[in-house]
Image: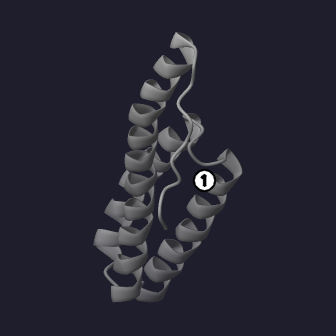
Amino acid sequence: MATKSKKSPRLASGRKRARQDVKLNAHNASLRSQYRTAVKKVEKAVAAGDKAKATELFAQMQSIVDSVADKGIFHKNKAARDKSRLSAKVKSLVAASA
């Protein structure tokens, strides 16, 4: 998708805001990527049937998901839903192997 050329703001405060938004957008994109990667790692470990790795990665994923949701990058309910679903998958994996 080609980016549209936006009109540059006239006011100095608007120009500064535009500069800040570039940096903020990059940081938020990084956090979104970190969140999604953490979730995918747990799903991959569950699919592989590696209960030890899945349990370890799930603990790490919870911390990342909570911190990203607290910053408002993703909604808290989405974070809770993802954690809940992955928790159920990890528990079923541990129960199946026990």
Tell how many labels: 1
Rendering quarter of residue 98: bottom left
Please name the residue shown 66% across and 47% down the image.
75
Considering the numbered disc 1 on the image, is that residue within a helix, a strand or a loop?
helix
Look at the picture and state if 83 lies above or below 5: below
User: Where is residue 94 shown, x and y percent of the image?
Assistant: 44, 78
User: Where is residue 38 shown, x and y percent of the image?
Assistant: 38, 60
- Residue 61 in sight: no
Look at the picture and state if 14 lies above or below 78: above
Please name the residue shown 43% across and 49% down the image.
29
Please name the residue shown 40% across and 86% down the image.
47
**Front in this rendered view, residue 83 or 90:** 83
User: Where is residue 28 shown, x and y percent of the image?
Assistant: 45, 42
Look at the picture and state if 6 lies above or below 89: above
Q: How is the image coloured?
A: one colour
Image-based side of 76 in relation to 9, left or right: right
Please name the residue shown 60% across and 48% down the image.
74
Image-based side of 47 in relation to 89, left or right: left
Rendering quarter of residue 24: top left
**Front in this rendered view, residue 65 or 46:** 65
Residue at numbered disc 1 = 79
User: Where is residue 40 shown, x and y percent of the image?
Assistant: 41, 71
Q: Crowding near pointer 1: few (<14 within 10 Å), some, many (20+)? A: some
**Which residue in the rendered view is the most extreme toward the top?**
12
Q: Amino acid at mark 1?
A: Ala
